[in-house]
Image (cartoon, rainbow, N blue to C red):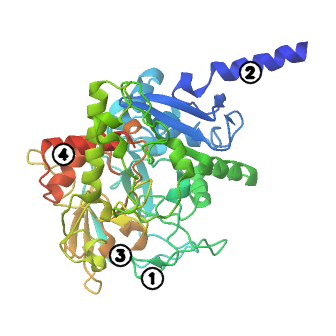
Amino acid sequence: MIKYFLLLASFLTFSMTSLSEIGWIEAGKGGLLEAETNLKNSEGKLGILNSQGAVDMKNHAFFEPLGSNGRACVTCHQPMNGMSISTESLQERWKITSGKDPVFAAIDGSNNPKLPQHLESSHSLLLNRGLFRIALPFPNKFDNGKPIKTEFTIEVVSDPTGVNLDSDLGLKSKNPTISVFRRPRPVANMKYVMSPDPVFNIKTGTLAATDPETGLTVGMNMMADSRHYTLKQQANDAYFGHLEGHKGLSKEQLQQILDFEKQIYVAQSYDKWGSPLVEKDEPAGLGTKAMKEGKVHILANNNRDPIFHWFRTWEKPETMPNTLTAEQKAFRASVARGNDIFMFREFWIRDATHINTIGLGNPVRRSCTTCHNGQMTAQDLAPGWVDLGTTNYPTWTENTVSKLTSDLPVFKCTCDKSAPPHPYLGRVVYTTDPGRALISGKCADIGSIVMQQFRGLSARPPYFANGSAKTLGEVVDYYDRRFDIKLTEKEKQDLVNFMRVL
């Protein structure tokens, strides 16, 4: 009888602290992550699917604080935020914990570890833009410690955080370091993200990269600069960096983290009126079940096999369930139009490194799916680093008519005379984030950032790697300006509604 009550108490504890009730998951608190659940956000609900069943978070390596600063992997990869994090959640955590939540750890949750950590202003880039500090050696080094030959020099033009000019932490320190600020990427739907290009890297004209341990071809779309090729590499780096660990992950801990990351899927599941987005498995590209069952590495920038399949059941009110209101039907019709714009609305793509430089021509008349071509995620199937202009002057997202300054650092990159220049910006490039170039050392890569997946967007604003777009509307506006697409206001709203349901 005593054993029965102990088991019942244990079950009730899991039920009381289930994910659907607690929202933000604190490191080490335990509880049950259900096999399938739906979490509210501003546009409806986000679906979470654990394909291997419910997960006991107690003593689970993804959810336990394994380092020295109280963080776990989940601290920066929250299920309610699409396995990433949102500024709304961060601002709430600041208020609840008076800035003492481990997510605000000085190492990278503040603008500069030397600033007074109790002040909100010291964490402004995280609180307002969802950005963590990424400190990278410059020049970068191979795994054997040998420096990578770099085709450019870097000067710090503007340093609002003070970290890049700091004598201990910056570019002129004993261990020269560049600090850039980036959004954490969703740790979900990883079978698509990690799907490798079979043989050839179209961006470099070389054979695809391989896992140094297994020799197998790997994908290079996991991180903003593609500095790690495998989940194992990323997990170990996060342990020593973001979690400030010292002893190293055990074999069992590492495997538990990898197993969890490979089996979790996220996608928007309900609209803002409370109705499920998927009825009788339609539309075929929506929801977590579709993510779990979808095939990987499908090039889908065509009308034979669209990125998110078809939205035909949403094109006309008469094909929609009678239970929907007129407003819901109008919304779904708008989503269907947005999908068509995304798939087929052509415009001139120009001066984009790793798009116009790979033999397509400059300019080239294509649609959004030229770059966002991977089925179910809209990532690039090839290694997805592209300079779309978000971080490089004059098209960077920091530059507006009324404000020519940035709260991000600004760097001046000067390419060596012996090296090929940046294809469209020449030998001197001003940037807030050199991106892939910090890893490859290539002048042509300055400002190139790896494209993210489109899933769970409604749960994890702001957008772009630098958190500069507070809304999906601002994302659409940027590309409309950047490529002079000339979208109407209705078309812009259709695109936004389309991205809200993914």
Q: Which residue is mark 2?
A: 11
Three-letter code, disc 3: Lys
Report the Cα–Cα distance between label 3 and label 4: 38 Å
Of the image marks 3 and 2, the number of the one nearer the N terminus: 2
The mark lying in front, picked from 1 and 3, is 1
Three-letter code, disc 4: Glu
Report the Cα–Cα distance between label 4 and label 1: 39 Å
Q: Which residue is mark 1?
A: 206
| Mark 3 touches mark 2? (CB < 8 Å) | no
Of the image marks 4 and 2, the number of the one nearer the N terminus: 2
Residue 161 screen position, x and y as percent: 31, 46
Q: Is residue 81 visible?
A: yes
Q: Give the position of the N terminus as an image quadrant.
A: top right
Q: Which residue is mark 4?
A: 491
Q: Which residue is mark 3?
A: 442
For the point 23% across and 48% down, the residue is 476
For the point 57% across and 43% down, the residue is 73
For the point 44% across and 31% down, the residue is 276
Helix, strand, or loop for circle 4?
helix
Of the image marks 2 and 1, the number of the one nearer the N terminus: 2
| Mark 3 touches mark 4? (CB < 8 Å) | no
Helix, strand, or loop for circle 2?
helix
Residue 467 screen position, x and y as percent: 32, 45
Q: Is residue 462 visible?
A: no
Residue 42 versus residue 320: which sits nearer the camera?
320
Helix, strand, or loop for circle 1?
strand
Residue 315 screen position, x and y as percent: 29, 42
